[in-house]
Image: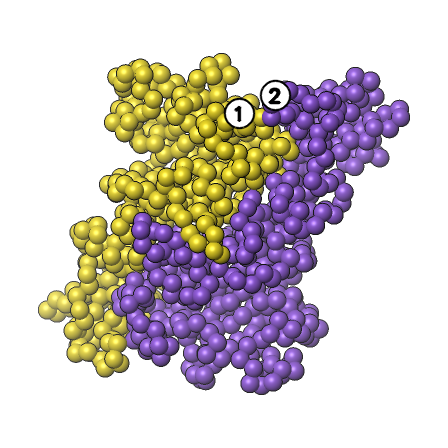
Chain colours: A yellow, B purple
C-alpha cells in the first residue's frame, strides 16, 4: 500500500490507508489508547482499542518509526478532524534496539534527553544544541528551518526575475584580506589558506561577467565573542549588480528581494515590506536616537531606538541608514560625491537590528590603488581582486543578508542558535 | 534615458536608445568604423562614421565600459538584424586610466593577457585561470557558468516539487571521519577543525526532521592528485530521503532530478534523460566491459566502455551501476538483503564518467555500531552522527551530484577547471 501523508488523510475518509512517521506521543487511558504519529507534514491521531495493539504501544518508545495502517474516520474532536481506527502498526525502527543486538526489556529505553510533544521545547539551549538531531524534530525548531528554506527560495526568485545569475565562489582564499583578525586559517597543501569571510571580492569580479549575480552560501567568521547574534559560520545571501547610478539602485533591488522573501515565508510568518522603505542619513539617525553627533557608528541600543522610531513614524519594520562615514566602511566603499567624508554605503535595520550591509563600490582601478594605499595596505595580497578592475568594470554595488539573523528576528528567537540547524561558535564544533 | 539590453534592440527599431557594456571589439576601416559592445545579454554593433567618434574609438581599449546612445537601425547584415547609428559614446570606466591618475597616451593600454573577441579562447588554461576575471567574460566560459546556475535551479525545482526541504549544514566539523586522508585541517579557536568533505552525516540526520532534504553547497577534498576531473572545492548537489523501500526509490528521484536539470539547461545544451535509465548490476558491468570478475571497482576505462555500451544498446547517455561490493562502499551503506556481500549502493555514469554516487543507507543504531566496529573505527568521533540513529530513523537513502563534473561532461570540456569560476586545486589558491 502506498503511504500517504497526515495532511492527506481528510481526503480519504472511510478508506483504509497507510501512514508512516515517528511516535510523537502515546496516551494510554483506561478504556482506550491514543498514538500520535508525526510525519513531515503534521500529526495523525490513531485510536487504539484492541489489547494486543495497546500492549505493543506500551512497549514502543517515543520517536520509534512506524507504519500505521487503519481506517480514516471522521472525529471532530481529533486534531485534524479525522483519525485512524482499526489500526495495525509495523515498527520500522525502534529506539529500544540495543547496540549488542539483544532486545532490551519492553519499554525500557533510556528517556529522551528532551521532550518533543509539548508545544514548546523546555530543555535549555545547550541541551537542545547537544542533541540537535532530536531537538530539530520539534515543530517550532523545524518551522524555523522551513522559514529559512523559504526565505532562500524567495531571495532567489526575486533575483532570477531581475536577470541575476547564481554563482558559486571559492570558500578557501589565499590572503586574509577582508578583516584579518577574524579569519580561520587552514593548511592548504602545506601553505596557509583562509576561509572566506564573504564572497565580496568574487561577486564584484563576476559583475564583470554577468552584470548581476547572487550567491547563497556559507561564510566564516572566527568571532572571538560569544553573543546571541554571532555565529562562526552562517549563510549569507549575497547580491551584486552593475550599471547602477548609485547606492539607491541597490536599495531598490534589496527592497524587491525583501518583498520576495516576505511572500515566500508568508505561510509561517507575517511580514510587510513597504514599497519604499524609509531611509535616514547617518547624521540624522544619530539625532533621532539622541546620540552625540561625532559617533562613528550606531551602537546596538541606537539601532533598537531607530527601529522603534521607524515603526512609530513610518509604520515600518525596516529602516535604511545611508551616508555612513567613509572611515567606518570597508576600503572598497564608494564615497558620496556630494560629501566625500560620507559614503554611498548603507545598512538596513530590521526590527531594530542590523540585517543587511550594502552600498555602492569603487569601480576604477586607480580608486582601489588609492584607497588601499591610504589605508596603509600592501597591494600584493589584493592582486587577483584588483586585476578585475584593470579590465573595465561598471559602476556597481550590492548587499549581503544574514539568513539566520533574518529568521531569528522574524520568529522572535532570543538566540540565533535557535534557528540554526547545527551552529558553530567559539565553543561549539559538534554535532 | 533608461538603458536597454542588446536583445531588446530589435523591439525599438527607429528609436533613440541607450545601451551599455564592454568594448568587445573595434574595427577601424577606411570609410567606417564598427564598435561591438558586449552586455550580459549579447552583442550590439555600433556604426561610426563621424571623425570625432572614430578618433574617440581609436583610443578606447578593449574592455572599457561604455554607454552608447544612438538610433536603432535595421541592417540584415548586422549580427542581430539591427545596429546603432548616429551614436555618441560615454566612457564609464576605461582600461587606460593609470594608477597614478595621469592619463596614459591615447590607446596605449597594455595589451589584454587574452583575446575575448574570437569565437573560442585560444589562451592556455593556466593563462585563463590566472586571469579568471577576464577569461570568464568570454561567451563560452560565461555560458558554462550559466549552465551551472540553470542546473542548480533545475535540481532545486525538481526536489521542491517533491516536498524536499533545502538545508544548510556545517562546513567545519570536529572529526575527520569520512575519509581522513583527504581532509583539510584548520585552526578552530585553538583546536583542530576539519572542512566537511560532504554533507552526508548532516543530511541523514535531517531526514529525521523533514524526511526529504537537499543542499547545494561547497564540499572540500584535499585531493593530492592533479587531474582534469578533481577539484579541492566543488559544488555538491546533495539529496536524501526517508521512507524508501530500497535504493531504487532513490534512483527514481534522481532520474526525475536529472530530467529537471536537463529541462533547465535546454537553452544551452541538449540532454535527454530516459524515463527509466538503464541499470546493470556491478558483476554484469564487469562482464560487459570485459574486466576480470574479481575487480572490486570500475576503472575509468571501464566506465568509458560501459558508457559506450549504454549508448549503443539503450541509446542512453546515462547508466546506473548497482550492487557494488560492500567492501568498496562507505560504512553507512545498506547491504543488499538478498546478497549481503553486495550493496544497495549505486553509481550513475554520464557519458562514461561517474557523475553521481548514491544508495540506501543503514538506518538502525546497532547496524552503525556493528559496521564501524567491523571497520575497526572507534565510535567516539561519530557520536553526534550516531546520536540521530538512537532516536529512530526511517529507511532512507540519497545521492550527490558533482555540479562542475556535470557541466564539464555536458559541454564537452576537457578539464573541469574550464567550467569552474575560480578553481581550487593542489597548485592553485588564487585568484
Q: Secondary structure at mark 1?
A: helix
Residue A303's quadrant in the figure? top left
User: What is the crowding at mark 2: few (fewer than 14 residues within 10 Å), some, or many (at least 20)?
Assistant: few
Q: Quadrant of residue B10?
A: top right
- Element type where label 2 sits in the image: loop
Residue A138 in view, yes or no: no
Residue B62 in sight here: yes
Quarter of the figure with the C terminus of chain A: bottom left
Give the vertical position of A296 relative to B391 (above or below): above
Residue A55 picture location, percent across and down: 17, 76
Q: Residue at x 43, y 72 (%)?
A: B330
Q: Which residue is disc 1 drawn over?
A: A370
Mark 2–mark 1 CB contact (< 8 Å) = yes
Q: Nearer the viewer, residue B41 or B260?
A: B41
Could you tell me residue A80's position as x and y percent? 28, 55
Tell me if residue B145 comes above or below residue A354 in the rendering. below
Question: Which residue is most to the right?
Answer: B30
Q: Residue A312 in the image: x percent, y percent? A: 28, 22
Residue wearing tag 2: B101
Q: Residue at x 32, y 16 (%)?
A: A294
Quadrant in the picture for the N terminus of chain A: bottom left
Q: What's the mark number on residue A100?
A: none
Residue occupying image coordinates x 63% and y 25%: B98
Q: How far is mark 2 from mark 1, CA to CA?
A: 9 Å
The residue lying furthest to the left in this view is: A30
Task: Classify residue B74 as left or right of residue B125.
Answer: right
Image position of B78 (left or right of A180):
right
The chain holding disc 1 is A
Side (left or right) of B366 relative to B100: left
Depth check: B184 or A108 in front?
B184
Q: Along the line of sight, which residue is nearer the eye, A172 or A165? A: A172
Amino acid at each position: 500500500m502506498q503511504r500517504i501523508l497526515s495532511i492527506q488523510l481528510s481526503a480519504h475518509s472511510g478508506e483504509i490507508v497507510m501512514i508512516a512517521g515517528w511516535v510523537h506521543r502515546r496516551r494510554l487511558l483506561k478504556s482506550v489508547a491514543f498514538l500520535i504519529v508525526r510525519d513531515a507534514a503534521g500529526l495523525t491521531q490513531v485510536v487504539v482499542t484492541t489489547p494486543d495493539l495497546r500492549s505493543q504501544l506500551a512497549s514502543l518508545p517515543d520517536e520509534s518509526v512506524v507504519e500505521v495502517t487503519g481506517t480514516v474516520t471522521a472525529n471532530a474532536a481529533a486534531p485534524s478532524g479525522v483519525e485512524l481506527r482499526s489500526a495495525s502498526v509495523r515498527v520500522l525502527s525502534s529506539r529500544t534496539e540495543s547496540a549488542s543486538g539483544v532486545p532490551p526489556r519492553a519499554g525500557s529505553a533510556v528517556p529522551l534527553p528532551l521532550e518533543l510533544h509539548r508545544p514548546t521545547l523546555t530543555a535549555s539551549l545547550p541541551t537542545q544544541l547537544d542533541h540537535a538531531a532530536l531537538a530539530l524534530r520539534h515543530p517550532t525548531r523545524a518551522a524555523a528551518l522551513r522559514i529559512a528554506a523559504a526565505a532562500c527560495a524567495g531571495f532567489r526568485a526575486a533575483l532570477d526575475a531581475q536577470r541575476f545569475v547564481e554563482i558559486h565562489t571559492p570558500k578557501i582564499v589565499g590572503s586574509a584580506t577582508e578583516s584579518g583578525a577574524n579569519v580561520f586559517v587552514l593548511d592548504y597543501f602545506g601553505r596557509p589558506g583562509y576561509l572566506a569571510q564573504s564572497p565580496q571580492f568574487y561577486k564584484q569580479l563576476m559583475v564583470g561577467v554577468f552584470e548581476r549575480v547572487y550567491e547563497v552560501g556559507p561564510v566564516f567568521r572566527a568571532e572571538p565573542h560569544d553573543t546571541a547574534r554571532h555565529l562562526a559560520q552562517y549563510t549569507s545571501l549575497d547580491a551584486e549588480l552593475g550599471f547602477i547610478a548609485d547606492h539607491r539602485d541597490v536599495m531598490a533591488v534589496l527592497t524587491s528581494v525583501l518583498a520576495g522573501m516576505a511572500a515566500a515565508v508568508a505561510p509561517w510568518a507575517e511580514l510587510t515590506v513597504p514599497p519604499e522603505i524609509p531611509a535616514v542619513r547617518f547624521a540624522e539617525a544619530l539625532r533621532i536616537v539622541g546620540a552625540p553627533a561625532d559617533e562613528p557608528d550606531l551602537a546596538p541600543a541606537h539601532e533598537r531606538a531607530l527601529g522603534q522610531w521607524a515603526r512609530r513614524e513610518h509604520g515600518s519594520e525596516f529602516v535604511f541608514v545611508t551616508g555612513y562615514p567613509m572611515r567606518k566602511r570597508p576600503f572598497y566603499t564608494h564615497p558620496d560625491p556630494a560629501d566625500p567624508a560620507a559614503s554611498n554605503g548603507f545598512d538596513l535595520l530590521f526590527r531594530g537590528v542590523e540585517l543587511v550591509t550594502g552600498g555602492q563600490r569603487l569601480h576604477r582601478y586607480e580608486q582601489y590603488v588609492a584607497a588601499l594605499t591610504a589605508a596603509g595596505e600592501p597591494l600584493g595580497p589584493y592582486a587577483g581582486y584588483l586585476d578585475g578592475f584593470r579590465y573595465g568594470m561598471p559602476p556597481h554595488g550590492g548587499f549581503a543578508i544574514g539568513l539566520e539573523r533574518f529568521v531569528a528576528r522574524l520568529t522572535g528567537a532570543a538566540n540565533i542558535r535557535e534557528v540554526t540547524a547545527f551552529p558553530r561558535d567559539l565553543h561549539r564544533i559538534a554535532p
